[in-house]
Amino acid sequence: MPLTEDRGITLPCSTLATTLAVQLRQLLQAIHHYDELIAAHCAEHEDDDLFAQLPGSGPTLAPRLLAAFGESRDRFASAQEMQRYSGVAPVTERSGNKSWVHWRFKAPTLLRQTLVEWAGQTITRSAWARAYYEQQRAKGKSHHVILRALTFKWVRFLFQCWTQRAPYHEARYLLRLRDKGSPLLHWFAQRPNRA
């Protein structure tokens, strides 16, 4: 049952709806064109494979990660500088006998968002990231706290891959964890059906 059949209301509303539909169609075409341009320019970039092959990067996050790191490899002297600049490094404050850790407030928002979103995608696509996530959940940590910590870890990997121009290899890292006797790998081995 219609709320009203008053043409003074239905006619302008239906006209607005059809006008917005036309505008939306044009906007979607423009977005599709941008996506094609971004994909084409990234494919031409020498570092495209470094980011496109990362677990969970995909056609959306790989170009954002590529843009986040850029081309100037002397921009950051260490992974710690990148972590601090991007805002994924936590800040510890102290006053008297108290200390607390909080999120870094001043940081490029889109850069931090890109890194955190990508780290979230790796949970289902990287064995060690999944194990780390579940290990921290078992300790009672919240999803967002774990995601920030996972992002902090991933930036170290990304920085090494980026500076050395070497792709990330999950199997190689799992072997390193095994050789070090990492508790993370031990925890992962006890839950193989969840990875």
Image (cartoon, rainbow, N blue to C red):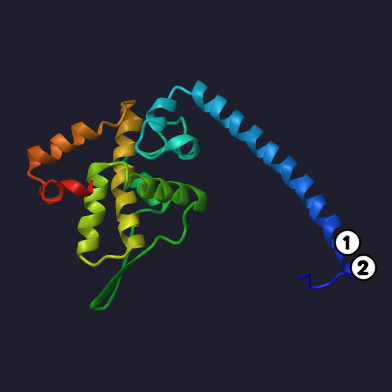
Label 1 crowding class (10 Å Cα cut-off): few <14, some 14-19, many 20+? few
As drawn, 7 above or below 82? below
Q: Which residue is mark 2?
A: 8
Label 2 crowding class (10 Å Cα cut-off): few <14, some 14-19, many 20+? few
Q: Write the residue at 45% across / 22% down.
A: 46
The Cα–Cα distance between marks 2 and 1, rounded to whole angstroms, is 7 Å
Instruction: Determine the image quadrant of residue 34.
Output: top right
Residue type pointed to by label 1: Pro
Q: Write the residue at 19% across / 31% down.
A: 172
Badge 2 marks a residue whose secondary structure is: helix
Residue 164 spot, x, y in % from top left = 31, 27
Badge 1 marks a residue whose secondary structure is: helix
Instruction: Determine the image quadrant of residue 101.
Output: bottom left
Q: Is residue 98 visible?
A: yes
**Camera-side residue of 30 and 2:** 2
As drawn, 13 above or below 55? below
As drawn, 137 above or below 119? below
Image position of 101 (left or right of 18): left
Q: Residue furthest right?
A: 8
Image position of 102 (left or right of 37): left
Q: Is residue 85 visible?
A: no
Residue type pointed to by label 2: Gly
Residue 140 spot, x, y in % from top left = 24, 67
As drawn, 111 above or below 69? below
Do tag 2 and tag 1 residues touch (Cβ < 8 Å)? yes
Q: Which residue is mark 1?
A: 12
Q: Write the residue at 87% across / 69% down.
A: 5
**Camera-side residue of 98 and 150:** 150
Quadrant of image for the N terminus: bottom right
